[in-house]
Image (tube, coloured by chain):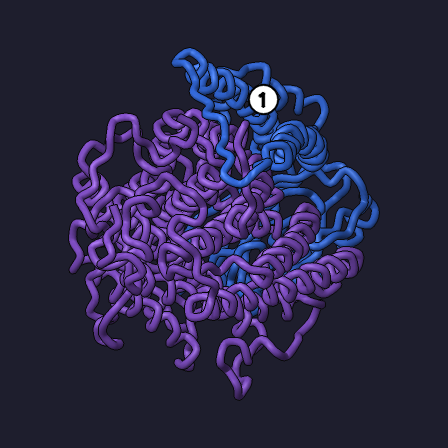
Chain colours: A purple, B blue
Amino acid sequence: MTTATYDHAPAHSGGGIGAWIFTTDHKRVGILYLIGSMAAFIVAGLMAIGIRIEQFAPGESGLIQYFVGDIGKRMTTGDAYNTALYFHGAAMILGFLIPGLTGFAANYLVPTMIGAKDVAFPRINALSVWLFYCGIILALLTFVIPDKPDVMWTGYPPYSIKTAGNTALYVFTVHLIGFSSILGAVNFITTIIYMRAPGMGWNQLNMFVWSILTGLTIQLIFVPVLAAAVTLLLLDKYVGTGFFDSARGGDPLLYENLFWFYSHPAVYVIFLPAMGLVYDIVATMAKKNIFNYKAAVYGGMCGLVVISGEVWVHHLYVAGMPNWLRIGMTMTTLMISLPVGLMVLSLWGTLYKGAITYNVAMMYAGLCFVLLLFGGLTGIPLAVASMTVHFARTSFVHAHFHFIMALFAAYAVFASVYFWFPAMTGRTADNAVSKLAFWLNVIGTQLTFWPLFIIGVDGMPRRYWDYSPEVVGAVRSENWTFYHHLSTYGAAITAAGIFLMIVGWVYSAFAGAHVGRNPWGSKSLEWTHASYPIGPGNFPEEVAVSADWTPYNYAK
Amino acid sequence: MHKWPKRLLLSSLALPLASLPAMAAEKIISPTHLWNEIWQEVFYDLLLIGIPFGLAAVYMMIRYRAKSPGQVGEAVNLSPAAAWGWILIPCALFLADDLLLFGKGWTLWNVQRVVPENSVEVKVTGHQWYFDFDYGKGVTDSELVVEVGKPVVLRMTSDDVIHSFGMTEYRLKEDLIPGRITYLWFYPDKPLVTEVDCMEFCGTGHSQMATKVKALPTAEYQAWLGKHKSASAGDLKFASQSDGAASK
C-alpha cells in the first residue's frame, strides 16, 4: 500500500513552466487539458452571454460587436452575431466538451483507475495536448483577424465557400483538434486493452473506463470523415475544386452527409464519458454496485457504438434527402432508446437500496439525472421525421441539445473536478461557496433553456438575432420577447454560478481545506492504491486485483 | 422523381398506416392539423415515460440517503434470469413505444410528402436574403399568395446558398438547396396571412429573410392574379435571367 515516500507528496512536484510544457505525465497532461478546455469554455460562455444579450429583445443591442473583438464596430450586428455563434458552437464542442471529457478526465482517471503507471504512449499524449493548444490558439485568432469566420460550427457550403469570412481558420482548427483527438483515441484504447492491472477482467472496469473505451472507439472511426469533409471544403474555397459548390457541379448535400456522419456519433463521444463520470460518482456516493452492469456496458455503451453510425440523417430531416431514407432513419433514431434506456435503467437502479451521501459532486450528478431525463425525452419527437418538419431549426432543437450535450456533459465534467479534486491536490473544493454556485447553476440553466423549449414549439427560428414583428409577426414577436427576457436572466444567473465555481476551484487548489486519503470512501484504485495526492508513477507498488474485486464492491 | 419513394411507402409493410393518402382523393388531409394532433399525442407519450422516471429518481434520491456515516448500500446482485429480464422487458417496452411513434410519424409523413393531385404549383427561389415566387404564366411576386381551399405544392431551389422555407403556422419546412429541387405542399383551408422565415443559416441577413404567405378567399385571389398578370411580364423575364446569371 502507500509508503511514506509518496504520501502527501505534491501532486505535480518539480519544474517550472517548461516542465509542464514538456511533460509526458498523464496527470499533468490531464491538467493542461482541463486548463485549455476551461479557457475555451470561458470564451465560449462570453459568446453565449453576448448572444443572450442580443436576443434579449427584438432589434439591435449594439453590443454584440464588442463580444467578438470588433471594438471599432466595423461589423454589422448580423455578422458579429454570426461570428459569436460560430465561436460558441465550435469552442464548446471541439474546445471544451470533447477535450474536457476525453482529454482531462480520461487522462487523469483512466490510468489510475486501471492500475497503470501511465498511458501506453506518453509522448504521443504530450503531442496530442500540444495539438489541442495549437487548435485553441488558432481558434482564438477569430477575435484578432478582420475577416472573422462566420460559418457556424457546421460550416455548410456553399455559404462557407462564398462567405468573405475566413473559413480556413475553421478548417485548420478542426484539423488540429481532430488530429489531437485521434492520437488520444489510439492512446487510450491501447492503454485500456493492454495496461490493466494483472487480474483485472473486462467486467471489473470502472464505468468511466468503459465509457472512454467505447466513446473513443467512435471518435477513432468517425473523426477522419470530418477531417476529409472540411479538407474538401478548403479545396473548394481556396483551390477552386467543385466537391460541394453546385455552381461547379458539386453538391452541398454531400457535405451535410459527411459532416453529420461524424458529428452525430460525436454526440456520443461526449455523452458516453459524461455518463461514465456520473455512474462512478453515483455508485461511490451511494456505496452501491452498478445495477445490471453487463446490460449497461455491453447493451448500453457498446450498443450505442453500433447504432451511432446509422442515425445521422435525422440532422437532415428537412434537407431534401430522399423520402424513404428519412422515414427509415426515423426508426433507427428511435431505436437509440434501447441502449440509452438500458443505461438509464442501470443508472436509476444504482440508487436503489444505496446509502447516498451528498457532496457537491453528487449534487451535480443528481442534477445530471434531471438533465438526462429532459434532454432525452425532448429528443423523442425530434427522432420522428414528420414531427421534426416543424421543430427543425427552431429553438426547441437548440434547447434539446443544450440539455443533453451542453448541460448534462458540462455538469458531469464539473462534478468530476469536484469529485477527484482531493486526488489531484490533497485538498477539497467542496464548501459553502461551491454549493451556492451549484444552486445558481440549477436555477440559471433551467431558466435559460425552458423558455426556449416553449418558444421553440411556437417556431422561434435558431440563429436569429432579430425577431421583429415584420419578420415573425406581431403576436409572436411580443410573446417571444417575454421568454427571451427570462432566458437572458437565466444566463446571467448561470454566469454568476460558473464564476463562483471557477474562483472556488482556483482558491481551493492553493488554499482549500486538507482532507485525508479517500474522503468519499471509494473502492476504486485511484483512491485505494494510488499515492495521495496522486504523484509520479501513480502507484507506490505494483497493483494486482483479485477475481472478486470490483470498484463497486461495497457490501461484501 | 418523387414517384417511386411514394410507391415504396404505399406498398410496404404497414398498409393500414399508408392507407391515408388513398383517402386524400376524397378529402384532403391537412398536414398542419395532423401535425398538431400527433404532437398532442406525442406530448402525452413523453409525460407517460417522463413522470415515472422523474418521480423514481426523486424518490430514491431522498429515500436512500445514508442514515449514518460509513453506511454502505445493499448490494443488488441479479440472477442471470433477472438480469436478462431487466434487459428484455424494458427493451420490449421501449421498442413498442418506438413502433407506436414510428407508426404515427409515418402516417403524418405520408400526408406531408405525398402531394395531392391537382395541387397548384408555385416555384420558389431563395436568394440572400429574400424569396421570390413564380406562379407560371408570367406571374411573379415577392410574397406567396394562394387561394383558400386549393392545395399548393412548392417546387423550391436556391440560387446562392442553402436556405429553408419555414412555414411556422403551417408546421412545415424544407430546405432550398442550390442545384437541387425540393418540394413541400400545404393546404390553406382558411383565409390567413402569416410569415414565412428562412430557417437555415444563410449569412448576414438571415434573421431578416422573411416574407408573407397569404391565403386569400377566391374573389381576392382572382383580383390579385388579375393585377399581376397585367402588370409585369417584363419583370419575370428579368428575374429568371438573373436566376441563371447569379449562380456563377
Disc 1 marks which residue?
B100
Which residue is at 59% across, 19% downward? B17
Secondary element under disc 1, as helix, strand or loop, is helix
Residue B174 visible in this rendered orientation of the protein: no
Provide residue A50's location: percent of width, then percent of height: 58, 71
Residue nearest the viewer, comparing B208 with A455 = A455
Residue nearest the viewer, comparing A468 with B42 = B42
Quadrant position of residue B150: top right
B56 in relation to A105, above or below: above
State left or right for residue A364 relative to residue A225: right
Q: Amino acid at mark 1?
A: Leu
- Residue at the far front: name it: A4
Provide residue A42's location: percent of width, then percent of height: 48, 68
State left or right for residue A186 relative to residue A448: left
Residue nearest the viewer, comparing A69 with A533 = A533
Provide residue B25's location: percent of width, then percent of height: 66, 23
Quarter of the N terminus of chain A within the rendering:
top left
Quadrant position of residue A492: bottom right
State left or right for residue B204 relative to residue A520: right
State left or right for residue B111 relative to residue B216: left
Which residue is at 16% across, 40% downward? A194
- Residue at the far top: name it: B81
Neighbour tally class for label 1: few under 14, some 14-19, many 20 plus, Cα within 10 Å: some
Query: Total number of numbered labels?
Result: 1
Q: Chain of mark 1?
A: B
Which residue is at 46% across, 16% downward? B88
Quarter of the C terminus of chain A within the rendering:
top left
Residue nearest the viewer, comparing B1 with A309 = A309
